[in-house]
Image (tube, rainbow, N blue to C red):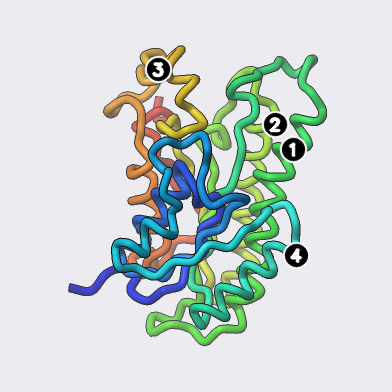
Amino acid sequence: MSKRLENKAAIVTGSSSGIGRAIAIAFHREGAKVICADIRESSPKDEDASTPTHETILSDGGYAIFVKTDVTIAADIESLVQVAVQKAGRLDIMVNNAGVGLEADNPHPIWEFPEDMWDATININLKGAFLGCKYAAKQMMKQDPGANGDRGWIINMGSVLGQVAAANVASYCSSKHGINGITKVAALDCAPYRIHCNALCPSWVTTPLTKGIFAAAGDQLAALHPFRGLGTTDDVAKAAVFLASEDNSWMTGAMMVVDGGMTAQ
């Protein structure tokens, strides 16, 4: 039985833990060659990711490599794409997942919000996605199209906090609203070349970044979601597989919300 991402080459940034790790492993299970990118091979905050993601994929019989990458540095992203093409022959899928939520442990109202926290969040979450779109599209547009006529699939990691707002998280919320903008612009720029660009927008999902928050307010946060409470990284990864596959044939510039019904209220 054919797998949905058979022999496609996929970059996943922020792949060492959390949602990025789940997406990388899900892509592997659907037949993709996975290029894992992060600032380190494994996350000291993620007990479930003690074995690096690429090693987990290799031990399961898949193809994966790790490329140390700082998504805020253009030369790193350009080199990452070049490595993917050298190793896998082309780049079919780019997942701009790397991000931070610095307010999680240190929230501030707008009148007290630290400028350095703002700068760091915008630089990683938004500039990182911009650079990923830029260099992925530059590669994809010059590739031969696949059998269905498409040249590539770009996925930016958004959030429900790119659809609505929350108090005391100015930089995170602003960065995720910015993801919507860069996704729409990239989708329009890339449409003539048959390159998809969509955003994946999860709500509260259990990850190493959210464990501390859930310990303090998990029941309260779960109650925000009419359908099954808190989400899992696998819930998001399954949606990413669709967005990266040929099943996604006529969808671009969209914000795909995966939120247990939170924003339906």
Q: Are marks 2 and 3 in contact (CB under 8 Å)?
A: no
Q: In this view, does 260 lie to the left or right of 72?
A: left
Amino acid at dot 4: Ala
Residue 59 image point, x, y percent = 32, 62
For discs 4 and 3, the disc positioned in front in the rendered view: 4
Compared with residue 169, is residue 180 higher up or lower down, i.e. above or below? below
Distance CA(mark 2)–CA(mark 1):
9 Å
Chain-order first, disc 2 or disc 4:
4
For discs 2 and 1, the disc positioned in front in the rendered view: 1
Chain-order first, disc 1 or disc 4:
4
On the image, numbered disc 2 is attached to which residue? 171
Q: Is residue 65 left or right of residue 167?
A: left
Q: Are marks 2 and 4 in contact (CB under 8 Å)?
A: no
Residue displayed at 49% across by 78% down: 88
On the image, numbered disc 4 is attached to which residue? 75
Distance CA(mark 4)–CA(mark 3):
40 Å
Could you say which quadrant of the image residue 183 lies in? Answer: bottom right
